[in-house]
Amino acid sequence: MSEHREVLFEFTAVGSVMKVAAIDAETGVEVTVMGPVHASRADLQKLALAKLRRRLERSDSR
């Protein structure tokens, strides 16, 4: 995955959990992660981005 791809993030609090969706703007591929609502948004975003990169790399290798 190129370092210069646009990624959109959506943060949704669900009770005591924060759901973070990361969407690749080019392909529309979306992944979600969940963590404590009090966790750092930057940490949750980094986790979601890492998951999205893994998903896109897996798709590229097929």
Image (cartoon, rainbow, N blue to C red):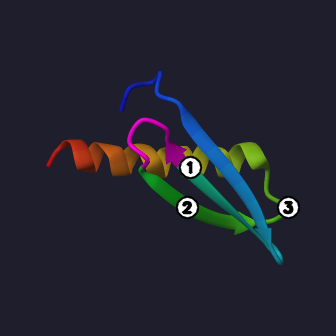
Please name the amino acid that badge 2 sits on. Answer: Thr
Q: Which residue is mark 3?
A: 38
- Inter-mark Cα distance, 2 to 1: 6 Å
Residue 43 percent location from the top left of the image? 69, 47
Which secondary structure type mostly characterizes the magenta part of the structure?
loop
Pointer 2 local density, CA inside 10 Å: few below 14, some 14–19, many at least 20: some
Q: Does the CB distance between marks 3 and 1 fall below 8 Å?
A: no
Q: Which residue is mark 1?
A: 22
Query: Mark 2: which secondary structure?
Result: strand
Return the disc, 3 or 1, that comes first in the chain's sequence.
Answer: 1
Picture residue at 69% right of the left edge, 65% below the top: 35
Q: Is residue 7 magenta?
A: no
Query: Mark 1: which secondary structure?
Result: strand
Query: Mark 3: which secondary structure?
Result: loop
Q: Which residue is mark 2?
A: 32
Q: Residue pushed farthest top?
A: 4
